[in-house]
Every structure is written in structure tokens, then in C-alpha cells.
Amino acid sequence: MKILIIDDDEAIRDSLELVLRFEHHEVRVARDGEAGLAALAADPGLELAFLDIKMPGRDGMEILEEMHRLRPDLSVVMISGHGTIETALEATRKGAQDFIEKPLDRDRVLLTVRNVQHLRRLKGENQALRERLSSTSREMLGSSPPLEGLRALIQRVAPTTARVLIMGENGAGKELVARLIHDLGDRSGKPFVDVNCAAIPSELLESELFGHEKGSFTGATELRRGRFEQADGGTLFLDEVGDMSLGAQAKVLRVIEEQRVQRVGGNQSIPVDVRLIAATNKDLRKECEEGRFREDLYYRLNVVPIQVPPLRERPGDVALLAATFLAQSAGRLGRPPLELAEPARAWLERQPWPGNVRQLRNLMERCAILLDGPRIEVKDLEGLTGPQAAAAAPDVFRSARSFEEFKELSERLFLQQRLQEHDWNVKRTAEALGMQRSNLYKKMERYGLK
Ligand SMILES: Nc1ncnc2c1ncn2[C@@H]1O[C@H](COP(=O)(O)OP(=O)(O)OP(=O)(O)O)[C@@H](O)[C@H]1O
Ligand SMILES: [Mg+2]
């Protein structure tokens, strides 16, 4: 295990280091809290810190809090001197795992380390289990030939660390593919971190990706680890990569080449081990030709291209998707099951689906909310999709139980309709409505429109 010792007393540092090294642990030492925090920030591999309570400058309790903010996953064991046992107990209530007392007892130290290791292993297994459970709802449905082809490709690239560029229309399933690649690969127990490059204003994107040092710009009141660091050991998903500014592109390229990141306003470079998966609905080759996307970055990202076929090219998947979404929505709303009449199913299969699977899912959700069932007919679907769809809006008047709910339902319907009119292109919809794109993204997330 990689262990950090923070103590102002050299004799304690040395003896603790000796004991731990003897057991083949990797050890770093720091003589005060500030140095300890810096060591932590520089080395994401540190798993455990021994932290002295009484130190000149900022004491152990203060540093403990900061550590939690910086590295919530770090295990901390307090080192307590005579007369600080009370404080040590309080520290365990604040998230320290344990404490040891001076003078140090070798066996007690080693037992504590073993306990920490045991707990960390349990936590890791627990998280992996939870992720496996939640990924069942992330199942990729469909058995059409294009989808089977996609599935085979995912299975082939998942166990590698090759960079993947996922292309496809809005709502076709690019993010789902990215998550599957992560879940099926060796990194599945490690973080999957996604960044939506279109949702973050370009002036903030760099600090989002690379982090920033405290005080590096106005508003940077605290040190912040960037997405690359957060994804260390795992996968970083650069969604809507075609919307990244040229400035950020240059920096991402450098990180890929050096496998190190530098925080904004910082001067040390931190090693990161990250698998990159990028997605876009733009034609990146054309973006390159027109000077909006760096060609060198394009080639770096596009080691394995994956094209997610639009839904209209795999009508064979529509029925299964529709039935599944319908059952899910009805279940969530606590409504009796609905079923599609045969002609309604055929009608769905003939639609062009510009918003792809997401559009189908939203339509099924609207069915579950607005229709009485139990059978859904073609005229129901036409009523919910055609230009007359707006006529369904008055239902909001009847179904809302409070003013708040009314406002939310109508806002949701309004945004959904406008998004649909713009083929679910967030940028264009936001422009048409005179809204900030980030604001629209927030609302979409809130209403599950995305
Ligand atoms: N084959 C599938 N089976 C089940 N659900 C799917 C499938 N494909 C897509 N979905 C669902 O459809 C929705 C849209 O998919 P996703 O977000 O992956 O699309 P996207 O291509 O990233 O869209 P955008 O371009 O808008 O970012 C998600 O809720 C996803 O879970
Ligand atoms: Mg997406």
C-alpha cells in the first residue's frame, strides 16, 4: 500500500517509516499539514495517511477536513499524543478510520494498517457490485444485424486500452456504448468519468478537465482536481468532443502525449493513467478541414472508430425498445401495463426517428403519462407526435396536482417540444429560445429529457 506520514516529529516519522517499509509498503513523509496536502495532490496513488493531531501551523483536525474534500477515498489514521485522545476520538467521528497512540507500538501500527487494507478491499468489492447492479439497467437492447455488429465491436475493444471515437446521431446510444466499453473492460472497478464538452463554457473547460490550484484565478478559492485526475486508473469519456475549443484541444493532445496533467495555475505535472473514449455527432473530418478541430488530435482519438447506427436503419429493434421503455415508464409511474396494438408497432417502425432511441423512449414515456390504455393505437401515437401534439398540453391542467407541479410539467413539455423541433440539437434550441446552453442542459437533466 502507498502510505503518507504527516508528523512534525522527526523521530516518529522515522520509526513509523521504518516499520512500514519493513512490511514492503511504499512510504512518503511530510513534516507539516501543508506539505502533506501537497504530497497527496501530487500522488493520486496514496491510499492511507497517518496524520499527527498536534502540529505547528494547521493542526491535524483542520488538515483532516481538507483531505476529505481533496480525496474522499483516502483512509486516514490519526497519530495521537498524550492528552489528545479526546481529539482523536472526535476525528474518528469526522471520518478518520482509526488512531494510534504515541509512543508507537509496532504491532498496533501493523494491525491498524491491515484493518485499513481489509476495509478498503470490502469497499472496493461493494462498489463493483453496486456498479454491476446498476449496469443492468444500462443494457443495450436490440438484436438487429447492425446492433449485433456493434455489440461484437464493443466486446472486442473493451478489454484493450485503445482510444475509441464513437460517432452517431443524437440519441443513438453513444454514451451507452461508452459505458459498456468501460463496464466490460479491465477498468470496470475504476472510475468512469464523463465530461460533456458542449455543456461547459469554454473558459471553464480547462479547469474542469485539468483542475486548478487554489487562487489561480478569481473564483478558484480551493484546489480542485480535474476530470483527468479523477479518472486516474479508469476511463475518461469526452462527450461532444467536437465542441471543444481549439485551446482545450491543444492541451488534451499534450496530456495524451505526455500522460501527465498540469493544473491551471500549477507548475508540477501529475502522472495520469486514463483510457480515453470520445463521442461526437459531428463529422470530425469535416471539422478538421474547416479548421475547427485539430487533425493531430483527431487521429489520436480515432484509434478505433465506432459508428452507432441510427434507429431508422434498424427498424427491427424498434418493437423491443418500445415495449421495454413502455413497461419501464408505466412501472415508474405506478400505472397498469400498456401494450402496443400491431398496427401501432408497424407505425413506429416506419418513423424516421431523427432523435433516435431517446426520442422513442420519450414518446413511450408520454404514452405512459397521457394515455389511458391498455392498448395503444396508431391514432394515439399520431396524436402525441404530429403538429396536433400541442393539443395534449391541456392535460397538464388536469394532471398537475399543485402549482409547482403544473409549472414543472409545462416547462418540461415546452422544452421537450422545442428540442424535438430542433432535432434535439441543444445548441440550436438554446439559441432559438434565447437561453444559455448550460441552463438548457441543466433543465434537460432535471426533467430527464436527456
Ligand atoms: N440499444 C439501446 N437499448 C436500450 N437503451 C438505449 C439503447 N440505445 C440508446 N438507449 C437509451 O437511449 C437514450 C439515449 O442514448 P445515449 O444518451 O447513449 O445517446 P447519445 O448518442 O449519447 O445521444 P446525444 O448525441 O444526444 O448525446 C439513453 O437513455 C440510452 O440509455
Ligand atoms: Mg450523449
Image (cartoon, helix red, strand yellow):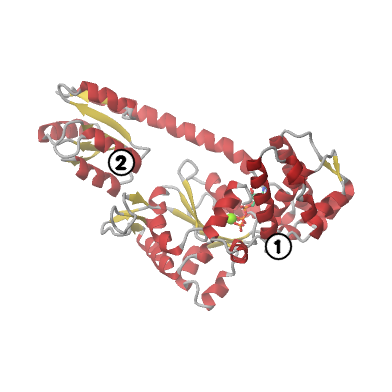
Asked whether residue 25 is in view, the answer is: no
Labels in figure, total? 2
Q: Is residue 368 left or right of residue 201?
A: right
The residue at label 2 has a CB less than 8 Å from ligand 2? no
Which amino acid lies under the numbered mark 2 shown in the image of this protein?
A: Leu
Report the residue at 42% width, 49% height from top.
Answer: 231
Task: Calculate the distance from the C-alpha at mark 1 to the C-alpha at mark 2.
Answer: 50 Å
Residue found at the very far front of the displayed protein: 403
Q: Position of residue 402 (x, y in %)?
A: 67, 38
Which is nearer the eye, 117 or 201?
201
Which is nearer the eye, 380 or 20?
380
Q: Is residue 108 above or below residue 365?
A: above
Quadrant where the N terminus is found in the figure: top left
Task: Please tell me the numbered disc located at residue 421.
Answer: 1
Q: Quadrant of residue 89?
A: top left
Q: Is residue 70 left or right of residue 126?
A: left
Look at the numbered disc 2 and give the secondary structure of its residue. Answer: loop
Report the residue at 37% width, 38% height from top.
Answer: 72
Which amino acid lies under the numbered mark 1 shown in the image of this protein?
A: Glu
Residue found at the very far bottom of the displayed protein: 290
Where on the image, by quarter, is ligand 2?
bottom right
Q: Of the residues under marks 1 and 2, which one precedes in the sequence?
A: 2
Query: Which residue has dot 2 on it?
Result: 46
